[in-house]
Amino acid sequence: MSFELSRNIIIGQYIPGNTFVHRLDPRAKILVTLFLLFGISFTRSLIVSFVYLATMLVIVWSARVPLGFVLRPFVRGLPLILFFLGFSVLWLGWQEPAGIVFFQWGWIRITSNALLMAVLSLTRLISLLLLISLPTLTTPITQLTYGMESLLTPLGYVGLPVHDIAMIATISLRFVPILAEEMERVIKAQASRGGEIGALSWREPMQIGKAMLPLVVPLFVNAFRRAEEMAVAMEARCYVSGAGRTRFVQLHAHLIDYVVVVGMLCYVIAVWYGADLAFNAVLARFA
Amino acid sequence: MHALAGVNLTIERGEYVVILGHNGSGKSTLAQHLNTLLWPTQGAVWGKEWNTRDVKRTLDIRRTVGMVFQHPDNQIVATVVEEDVAFGPENLGIPREELLRRVDWSLEQVEMQAYRTRAPHQLSGGQKQRICIAGVLAMQPEVLVLDESTAMLDPQGRNEVLAIAHRLNREQGVTVVAVTHFMREAVDADRLIVMSEGRIVMDGPPRAIFQEREQLRQLHLDVPHVSALAAELHARFPGFPGNLLTVGEIVKEVKKWGAQYEVRNTQHEIRDTDFAAPDATRNTNH
């Protein structure tokens, strides 16, 4: 385990660029992400999920985001993912309809439908990973919070403290690198006094758990102290929640943003129905 | 037990005041009374014509008396420098055009324009503290309170911050109240207030206060090296001025006296140890 935590934190990592995806209004990006999220998550058709995977690859390519970088968490988690996939293939092996039975030995049965489900899960997982990484990779995080705030504004009329939520999100993001740095410092301090955290491998989960405790406690204590000081500092700068504030950052939606949002909505619906229709047509021919 | 007791203090417009004291002397508590972060249990604090107890005036007082704290990381609200500077005026509801102008102006005042789109965690301590000052300046305060704002900084960062505070005081007429436990920060002040156990024990120009070495020693405060040296010289050579504060002044005086002492050198051999102040080893570089 390395000590350089702050470098390994991917949350909110922004890759500067000037592509079409980068320039899109953050609100449009959030909406399109939601549409695609819905589409990818709820399809049960293999063809549709392949279409979405292709779509995501095209978007990632057009944003000039290195694919290897986005897929890094996936590659790192691959052993675990494969383990669960294998498990689910065995689990689904006795489910009907089974399709073609490839292999049977005792209680182990591998069927074509179980394999198809596994492939579906895998493509879905990759698509989702690409999808949720994209907004933060192509948009400065503050723009995203402002986008979120702006989208949630209607809910403010029914009493949701939209501005406060956005403020909380901004401050949390602001504290991510600070706390990572602090964690690093605490780990080093513990290690220099014989703490074990850096020396343990993942094969000893219990020991790691025990060694984590003296890290987490000082981290929390510090976080509370910081939060309190931050509250006083904000008050000193005349912060009064919500009312009457003006905005430094202003979002401007252009025609192209509307076009993209409506276009992607139509795309998701079309893929949803179109692919199913095509699939059924193909099935009907063979039946 | 009172954190502050019997404090009677008037700070004039345009003054550069340093409040000095040990940990627990009440200096920070006093500072936080200045912009209604704390209320006195007895007595009153007035900012301009406003009593700090008047809740309707809280925002007026806070925008007039800007405050910078010790830890820059715990004051920076936004994830981008310019957005953080804009935070104060945003809260005040300043119209956007004026807002943009103020952000530009404030960043210019602390010489941080080049960093306006950076993330705060990429900056040094001194730079972060300058951003905090800019954030306060954007509210266009008349008073700038630095509550131990240099305590966490390295010497270079400290000098940067102090230089900016002095320039704002000189050029923009901002009243500065700096709370610190660094003696040498008091040297350039117009007025020095020494606190101990919640009371003001000394109040006057630094030159006069650093003369009172015995009283300062009783308060466990060190006199700056230069003052100690000047006092030692004064004790040995009565004609030598004992109230010098800066290295420049000492050098000038010693040069002036050098000519006369060439004659007397034979009578009085000056050794290094003659000038070692008893507390000299405890201080850092000057």
Image (cartoon, coloured by chain):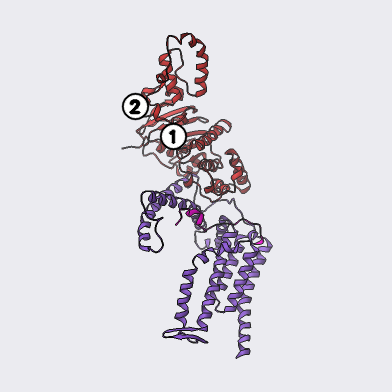
Chain colours: A purple, B red
Q: Residues within 10 Å of mark 2 (few under 14, many from 20)?
A: few
- What amino acid is found at the position of numbered circle 2 in the picture? Gln
Q: Is residue B64 above or below residue B237?
A: below
Q: Is residue A14 magenta?
A: yes
User: According to the image, label 2 marks what residue?
Assistant: B218
Q: Is residue B119 magenta?
A: no
- What amino acid is found at the position of numbered circle 1 in the picture? Thr
Tell me, for residue B77, which label it has, or none.
none
Q: Main secondary structure of the magenta part?
A: loop
Element on which disc 1 rests: strand
Q: Is residue A144 above or below residue B138?
A: below
Residue B60, position as x, y percentages in the image: 51, 42
Left or right, A285 with respect to B216, comes to: right
Residue B205 in view of the camera: no
Q: Residue furthest left?
A: B1
Residue B200, position as x, y percentages in the image: 38, 30
What is the span of residues highlighted in magenta in the rendered image?
A: A1-20
Residue B82 in view of the camera: yes
Q: Is residue B252 above or below residue A88?
A: above
Chain letter for the residue marked with disc 1 in the picture: B
Residues tagged by mark 2 and mark 1 found on one chain of the structure: yes
Left or right, B234 with respect to B131, comes to: left
CA distance for labels 2 and 1: 18 Å
Quadrant in the picture for residue A55: bottom right
Chain letter for the residue marked with disc 2 in the picture: B
What residue sits 66% from the left and 57% below the top? Answer: A18
User: According to the image, label 1 marks what residue?
Assistant: B180
Residue B100, position as x, y percentages in the image: 62, 46
What residue sits 46% from the left and 55% below the top? Answer: A2
Q: State the residue in front, A266 or B220.
A: B220
Q: State the residue in front, A193 or B258.
A: A193
